[in-house]
């Protein structure tokens, strides 16, 4: 599994969606100096979500300069068509939405066959129960805490009880999958999010929206560590 004896209890995954696209290398390096564990890459197609971002070519460019694993979140229609390209470009983790994939087990198995960690994503209005039959097969579950498509949105409070339901479901299934949270993560709510069961915190504005992304990453990690006693 992704977590190891030396891995932090909570991982920080800065989202480049909020970074300066004219200076991605600079911003990513700053976040890494601040203690980032992963680099989160949001891929949007303008169909599944109302925004368009980047493709495999940019992931390949990021891979050349990033020293942390690339966590690629496919917010696109027909993600099965593009998994191979993103893994070949350098993705270490690939997540797909329950809402976008008709044959979820096949998609998860294919991501793993490509050599990447496989994640499944659920939107705010998608019940946690839809994870039940895939829980034992995934490496991580990504719980959206905003409606996907744009950075800078506010955290949806109902995500907290939902995280607890996801954690209970994974435990009942005997799954060691990690729980990732994406959307509105900030210093003010880190303690509650971690207490509800999150292992990976995706943060965009809370890191790249600050004047000093390195310090902001370090502060977020400090808040997470205090919550876990690390």
Image (tube, rainbow, N blue to C red):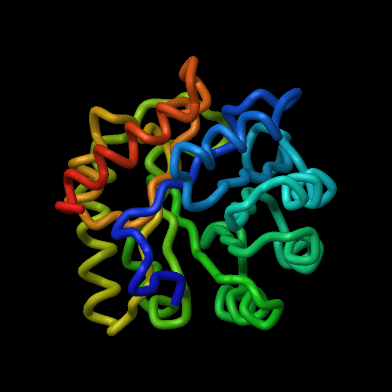
Q: Residue at x 39, y 76 (%)?
A: 135
Report the front residue among 105 and 85.
85
Relative placement, left or right, of 78 versus 201 is right
The x, y position of residue 162, in whole percent, is 26, 53
User: Residue lying furthest top in this view?
Assistant: 211
Residue 34 sits in quarter = top left
In the foreground, 201 or 121:
201
Q: Relative to 25, does residue 42 appear above or below in the rendering? A: below
> Compared to 30, does 230 lie above or below?
below
- Find the residue positioned furthest to the right: 57
Percent position of residue 96, x then y: 58, 60
Residue 197 placement, left or right of 6: left
Quarter of the view holding residue 93: bottom right
Q: Which residue is drawn at 30% across and 54% down?
A: 198
Query: Total marks drawn?
Result: 0
- Toward the front, the furthest residue is 33
Image quarter where the N terminus lies is bottom left
Q: Is 98 on the left-hand or right-hand side of 19? A: left
187 or 74, nearer to the observer: 187
For the point 62% across and 44% down, the residue is 42
Residue 159 as seen in the image, left or right of residue 27: left
Closest to the observer, 140 or 70: 70
């Amino acid at each position: 599994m992704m977590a190891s004896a030396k891995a932090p209890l909570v991982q920080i995954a800065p989202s480049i969606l909020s970074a300066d696209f004219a200076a991605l290398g600079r911003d990513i390096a700053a976040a890494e100096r601040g203690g980032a564990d992963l680099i989160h890459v949001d891929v949007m197609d303008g169909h599944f979500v109302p925004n368009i971002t980047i493709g495999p070519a940019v992931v390949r460019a990021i891979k050349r300069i990033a020293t942390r694993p690339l966590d690629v979140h496919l917010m696109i229609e027909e993600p099965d068509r593009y998994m191979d390209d993103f893994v070949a470009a350098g993705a270490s983790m690939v997540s797909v939405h329950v809402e976008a994939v008709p044959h979820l087990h096949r998609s998860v198995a294919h991501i793993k066959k490509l050599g990447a960690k496989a994640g499944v994503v659920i939107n705010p209005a998608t019940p946690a129960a839809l994870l039940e039959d895939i829980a034992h097969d995934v490496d991580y579950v990504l719980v959206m805490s905003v409606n996907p498509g744009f950075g800078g949105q506010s955290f949806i409070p109902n995500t907290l009880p939902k995280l607890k339901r996801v954690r209970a479901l994974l435990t009942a299934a005997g799954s060691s999958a990690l729980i990732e949270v994406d959307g509105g993560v900030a210093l003010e709510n880190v303690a509650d999010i971690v207490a509800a069961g999150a292992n990976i915190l995706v943060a965009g504005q809370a890191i790249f929206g600050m004047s000093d992304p390195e310090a902001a990453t370090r502060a977020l990690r400090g808040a997470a560590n205090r919550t876990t006693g690390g």
